[in-house]
Amino acid sequence: MNQALGPKYQLSFAKHRSRYIQVQLSLPASEEPRVLSLPNWIFGSYLIRDFARHLMDMCAQTAHGHPVALRPIDQHSWTLAACSEPVTVRYQVYCADFSVRTAHVDADHVFFNGTSVFLQVHGAESLPHQVVMQADGPLNSRVATTMPAVDVDARGFGCYQAAGYAALIDYPVEIADFIERRFEIDGVPHRLAFTNALPNTDFDRIAADIEQICRTEIALFGGAPFSQYLFLIALDESGFGGLEHADSTALIFPAKHLPALGQSGMTDEYQRFLSLCAHEYFHNWNVKRIKPAAFAGLVLDQPAHTRLLWLFEGFTSYFDDWLVRHAGLIDQSQYLKALQQTINRAVQGPGWHRQTLEESSFYAWTRFYQQDENAINAIVSYYTRGAVVALLLDLYLRSKGKSLLEVIQRIWSEHADTPIQEGRAIEQLIESVAEEPLGEFFDSALRSTEPLALVEQLAQFGVHAQPIAQISGVDTGLLIQEQGDDGATVRVVIEDGPAAVAGIAAGDKIIAVDGFAVNAREWSARMARYRPGDQLEVHLFRQGRLRCYSLLLKEPRLNHLSLKADDSDPQAVARRNDWLAVCPL
């Protein structure tokens, strides 16, 4: 595309009550046809999402109203015919997905990622991209984004400009009557925009806690890699999630779990929120700048495979809780409780016996991001098992006078601007920090399904890891959907467990046990009446047909760990205190 002017997008939010964003894309004249497309996925979320299915009423015309041919190439790209005059492409985007990955518009707010809204003009990606946001959205709304402003009003409406298409789609936008807090770290301004918050939420405390986390992370890396940062915090009834961007993050969290004015102490839920903030902020270094070679380009029409998500998501998942402790916001016992939950999520199902960590990463697109009722039997999470591998590596390095923090700092120094290649290059870098070969560890941790030596390693750091059962009483080998008064619908069946042996399957609706009606609310209490070895007569419906199965209950499996501080060995206690020390800022 031989032109001096880049694409210009004008966004109208006048139809926000109908969940539409209206877009006008202005392009200069061109003697050649141009290809327009919308990405199929967004960085940080590894699933083909077909964003283009939400584009409506697309057409193109000149300033004089003459139509310009716009022909589909495939499901997400089009050819715009050559035209000797400037062209305007008009379309609407339907925005009804309340998530951090796409776009959501209603009477109260507008949120969108550029991957859902901005057509890519092939050949013009490196040119400046201008965006004009009209002030016709929800009442009293303002704009929150880190997209560079060119000419905007006091509420943030007006003209913005991104350096290119890659930058353009990395600026999420929130338009709402949000509540804002600000702080500054080493001259770098940080903003928090809260949408849909409950009355009397303690925003000052939240901002102070997040500031402490950010200061801790910046200190560990020796400076911030951005000139500003924005937390977009959408509050919901029960949602949870986060997505990283180059100088911002979009978060969703239950409003009821944020602290109220006058509320002291650290709840498990609020601690989880702070860990989410720490996780996404850590991604500024680990994945947005330190990244696999597969993510280095702008190929967003097909999956970008990597076997390294154990590093980018697993290491980050280990550091997030650790950073909340390192920032001094929780004590050691609270940290160990969070670590226990991470470990137990990694080993709670048979999937870790079947899939390696590298395989989990490679197949993220079709398995981790498309989980079904059999996922617990089929896959392992590169988040949680990756975090456990990071824990083991950190403890081992600390026993040798090193740490995983030194590893991530070395990776940052060598790969801030150089993508990490597939293969064992990163393992060799870690070995250089350790000053010893670790091939046996990596082969076991990344490329096998062998159990990880958690109990022994934690003991050296004054942590007693006791194998326990995930459940008390009896093992049925199934999980029930939490809601429903009309029977108890089976959500998951554990492979080779009692339910699987009996012939019970996911989706079955259990209506009676031993001749007595049962529903989801009563299931746990009903099972508490039985003992291992009891044989149950289970009546259920499957595909409309009544069936009866005999379910033999077993002893619960010792598939979880309980972590407790062990102060019996002074040297181990000293190592634990060093590992879980508060950062001196």
Image (cartoon, helix red, strand yellow):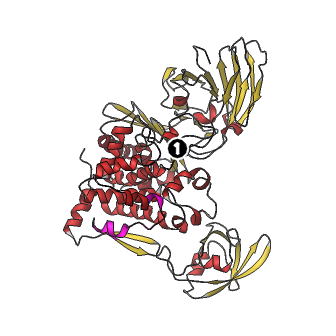
| 396 sits to left or right of 259 | left
Indicate yes or no whether the magenta region holds residue 292: no
Picture layout, residue 124 above or below residue 84: below
Q: Residue visible at 69% across and 35% down? A: 76
| 224 sits to left or right of 571 | right
Q: Which residues are magenta?
A: 445-464
Q: Quadrant of residue 541?
A: bottom right
Picture layout, residue 328 above or below residue 195: below
Q: Dot 1: few (<14), some (14–19), or many (≥20) neighbours within 10 Å?
A: some
**Depth order, front residue of 527/461:** 461
Picture layout, residue 48 above or below residue 447: above
Task: Look at the numbered disc 1 and give the secondary structure of its residue.
Answer: loop
Residue 387 percent coordinates (x, y) = 42, 56
Q: Residue visible at 65% across and 19% down? A: 26
**Depth order, front residue of 290/240:** 290
Picture layout, residue 445 above or below residue 498: above
Residue 551 percent coordinates (x, y) = 64, 83
Q: In this figure, which residue is indicated by the disc labeled 1?
A: 44
Q: Quadrant of residue 491?
A: bottom right
The kind of residue on which mark 1 rests is Gly
Indicate yes or no whether the magenta region holds residue 462: yes
